[in-house]
């Protein structure tokens, strides 16, 4: 008996392996990303691929030496810049029909008189005129070159009491706005983003993350000795790890320095969108905050929440974050709804060992892997394009057109929350309140359902006002009538008893 | 003749049951008077108490099922009817036992039956308020729903107040003493849970011991 059970179990296991294996193998050649999104309960739902990996480019395919711990990608028009930190160089690639070719290798530049080299550069920014900004981290400076690589200015450690004067100034990330103001992150500077004037003067910090104390921390601190206090982690703002400046000159900054508890409490913000004053204006209207994975389990050395390394924002204000913990990419819309997540750890095309940077050219995404030194290109699928078409139509106010796209999205993925809500909104505009409520209820959209219900109720009452009044009047009369009947019955009973009593006599 | 008598008795029982159930409404609005008469004048009945308890459970189920999704998050795939029953019954019975144990020691007048009846009769306002709330929740928007929460609190507070009064009247306690009795009953509930867990853990250890002992003997003998 027991043996038979075991045998059955073994058979079942084998069948499972056989059933799963060919699928896995087939996936490797055709569709090899795992795309999903989250529902109202935070459960993962698989989804058709919104992005597909198309090609992998590394030093060999570019016809140069292998990239060594590259740190960053930057895209301007159809040029893609790869900061090859370990080889002290920056590669300028040109994209044409989805293939990348090496057009320039930035290794040295012309200073005032002599030729100078880069040392472990970490980031590059190229403005619309072609001016190049490089954080030459190993040489403790920020360089501003013209397009022929001639030095325009260099920015060294600002002579300012806000900046630590003992340790070297190691700039790591840079973005520049249209006015030539530079926004720089530097190692061991945690007061926010350093802001420099176009002439290289340090103005101050923007966007320092607010320090969050928990009550337990405060109590602990209160009752500990000075020696213990020094051992404790200081209450300091978190350091950002990357910057991205979008077309409207809003700066996205990311951090991977937070605890799971802070994320659960909603106090940690892996991504912010700063306006010119440094205020966080990122819209977080989604059922879940833009924190990458909303549920995680510890598996194979991957523990805790997503760790966001970089972000890129497209023209339609959707943005994509890359997570180094599970090598995933998360796409969000302007409102903060998760559109889809894809990628994963591994060595196949579309998977990463240590993704560190993400950029986009057009609708294509490029992801840089720090450890393999390769760039993976992702292209939007039909499904992904439909989502974006629907979002675009909605943002310009074409609600019907948007609903048509959402209808197609829904046909491809019946679990896609935004599709239902999108269709519902369009029905709401067309005054089909009942239909809208149905769609909202399926996805448990409280706010929109309430709105639709309010109109529906108003309409209903207006259309049935006569009945409503009649019912109310009837309800008002019921107690009176009941009282009357009771009284009559009581009187009849009394009468009967009286009569029977008198009869008995 | 015999048949007639039986019917008559049943009829009496039914009337008594109906009266005792209707008495819950009186208790709800006149708790001091009501709880005194409930036990001392035998105006309440166990049958009515059971009915009220079952109604409370049905109220819970019904509000889980029919409250508008705006105000309740029920994941049906995770709901287990036995857990729901236990969730209501276990604390109630624990309280009854703990309260009876305690009050017997501190010259409470009530029997265990009385404590149980007091508890069940105290649930009346919860039943009467939660059911309409469930229906109304389907006719309001999310913002208007705020008042539903207050009614929910009202139901709980009313029931809580009735429990307090029931302890006072059934055991003939002063207010202070009743509050203390309830607090210590809560502690007693925890102790009972602890003892149950201890008992099961010890029993399972003992069972495991005898099983391994048996195995050892079989191993030696064969």
Image (cartoon, coloured by chain):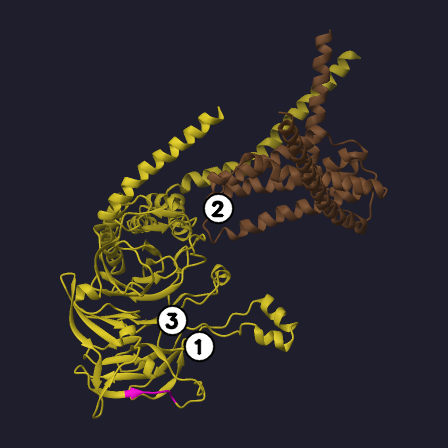
Chain colours: A yellow, B brown
Question: Tag 3, which secondary structure?
Answer: loop
Indicate the position of residue A433 as horizontal and vertical percent values: 34, 46
Q: What chain does mark 2 sit on?
A: B
Quadrant holding the N terminus of chain B: top right
Give the crowd class for mark 1: few <14, some 14-19, many >=20 residues within 10 Å: some
Residue A480 percent location from the top left of the image: 59, 35
User: Which is in the foreground here, disc 3 or disc 2?
Assistant: 3
Asked if one can make out residue A75 in the rendered structure from this viewpoint, the answer is: yes
Q: Is residue A157 magenta?
A: yes
Q: Is residue B67 above or below residue A390?
A: above
Do the residues bearing badges 3 and 1 touch, measured as CB atoms within 8 Å? no
Q: Magenta span covers which residues?
A: A154-158
Measured in 3D between alpha carbons, the distance from the residue under mark 1 to the one under mark 2, in whole angstroms, is 41 Å
Residue A37 x %, y %? 35, 51
Report helix, strand or loop for mark 1. loop
Q: Please report, as a chain letter, where disc 3 is located.
A: A
Q: Is residue B123 visible to the viewer in this orientation of the structure?
A: no
Kindly identify which residue carries mark 1.
A190
Give the camera-side residue of B158 and A232: A232
Residue tagged 2: B73
**Quadrant of the rendered image containing residue A163:** bottom left
Kindly identify the residue that appears in the image at 71 percent across and 44 percent down.
Answer: B189
Report the residue at 61% width, 31% height from top: A484
Quadrant position of residue B15 = top right
User: Marks 3 and 2, how far apart in space?
Assistant: 38 Å
Quote the CA–CA distance across marks 3 and 1: 10 Å
> Which subunit holds the residue at mark 1?
A
For disc 3, the marked residue is: A241
Q: Please tell me whether residue A253 belongs to the stretch shown in magenta.
A: no
Q: For the C terminus of chain B, give its image quadrant.
A: top right
């Amino acid at each position: 008996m027991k043996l038979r059970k075991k045998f059955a179990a073994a058979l079942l296991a084998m069948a499972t392996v056989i059933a799963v294996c060919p699928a896995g193998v087939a996936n490797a050649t055709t569709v090899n990303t795992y795309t999903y999104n989250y529902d109202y309960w935070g459960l993962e739902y698989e989804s058709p691929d919104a992005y597909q990996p198309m090609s992998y480019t590394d030093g060999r395919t570019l016809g140069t030496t292998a990239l060594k711990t590259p740190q960053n990608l930057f895209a301007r028009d159809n040029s893609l810049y790869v900061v090859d930190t370990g080889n002290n160089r920056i590669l300028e690639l040109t994209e044409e029909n989805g293939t990348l070719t090496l057009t320039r290798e930035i290794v040295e530049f012309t200073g005032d008189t002599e030729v100078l080299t880069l040392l472990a550069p970490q980031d590059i920014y190229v403005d619309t005129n072609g001016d190049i900004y490089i954080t030459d981290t190993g040489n403790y400076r920020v360089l501003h070159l013209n397009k022929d690589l001639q030095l325009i200015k260099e920015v060294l450690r600002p002579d300012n009491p806000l900046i630590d004067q003992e340790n070297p100034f190691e700039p790591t990330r840079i973005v520049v706005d249209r006015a030539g103001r530079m926004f720089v992150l530097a190692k061991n500077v945690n007061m926010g983003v350093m802001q420099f004037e176009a002439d290289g003067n340090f103005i101050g910090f923007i966007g320092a993350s607010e320090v969050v104390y928990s009550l337990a921390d405060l109590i602990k601190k209160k009752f500990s000795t000075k020696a213990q206090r020094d051992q404790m982690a200081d209450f300091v703002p978190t350091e950002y790890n990357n910057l991205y400046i979008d077309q409207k000159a809003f700066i996205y900054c990311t951090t991977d320095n937070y605890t799971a508890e802070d994320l659960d409490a909603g106090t940690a913000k892996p991504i912010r969108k700063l306006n010119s004053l440094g205020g966080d204006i990122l819209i977080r209207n989604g059922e879940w905050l833009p924190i990458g994975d909303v549920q995680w389990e510890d598996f194979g050395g991957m523990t805790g929440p997503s760790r966001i390394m970089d972000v890129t924002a497209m023209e339609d204000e959707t943005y994509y974050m890359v997570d180094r913990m599970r090598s995933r990419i998360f796409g969000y819309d302007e409102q903060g709804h998760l559109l889809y997540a894809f990628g994963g750890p591994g060595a196949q095309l579309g998977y990463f060992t240590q993704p560190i940077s993400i950029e986009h050219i057009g609708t294509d995404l490029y992801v840089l892997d720090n450890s393999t030194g390769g760039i993976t290109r992702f292209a939007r699928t039909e499904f992904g394009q439909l989502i974006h078409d629907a979002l675009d139509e909605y943002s310009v106010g074409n609600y019907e057109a948007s609903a048509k796209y959402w209808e197609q999205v829904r046909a491809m993925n019946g679990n896609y929350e935004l599709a239902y809500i999108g269709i519902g909104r369009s029905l709401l505009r067309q005054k089909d309140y009942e239909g809208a409520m149905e769609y909202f209820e399926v996805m448990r959209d409280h706010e929109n359902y309430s709105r639709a219900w309010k109109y529906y109720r108003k309409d209903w009452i207006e259309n049935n006002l006569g009945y409503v009044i009649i019912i109310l009047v009837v309800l008002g009369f019921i107690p009176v009538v009941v009282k009357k009947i009771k009284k009559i019955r009581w009187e009849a009973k009394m009468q009967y008893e009286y009569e029977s009593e008198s009869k008995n006599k | 003749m015999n048949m007639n008598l039986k019917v008559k008795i049943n009829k009496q029982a039914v009337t008594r049951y109906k009266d005792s159930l209707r008495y819950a409404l009186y208790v709800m609005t006149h708790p001091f008077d009501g709880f005194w008469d409930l036990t001392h004048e035998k105006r309440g009945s166990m049958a009515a108490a059971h009915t009220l308890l079952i109604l409370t459970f049905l109220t819970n189920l019904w509000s889980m099922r029919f409250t508008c999704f705006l105000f309740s998050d029920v994941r049906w795939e995770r709901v287990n009817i036995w857990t729901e029953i236990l969730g209501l019954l276990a604390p109630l019975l624990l309280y009854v036992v703990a309260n009876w144990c305690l009050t017997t020691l501190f010259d409470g007048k009530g029997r265990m039956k009385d404590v149980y009846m007091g508890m069940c009769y105290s649930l009346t306002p919860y039943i009467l308020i939660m059911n309409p709330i469930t229906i109304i929740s389907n006719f309001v928007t999310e913002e208007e729903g705020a008042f539903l929460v207050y009614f929910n609190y009202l139901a709980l507070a009313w029931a809580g107040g009735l429990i307090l009064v029931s302890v006072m009247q059934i055991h003939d306690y002063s207010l202070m003493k009743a509050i203390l009795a309830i607090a210590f009953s809560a502690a007693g509930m925890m102790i009972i849970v602890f003892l149950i867990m201890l008992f099961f853990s010890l029993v399972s250890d003992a069972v495991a011991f005898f099983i391994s002992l048996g195995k050892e003997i079989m191993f030696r003998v064969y």
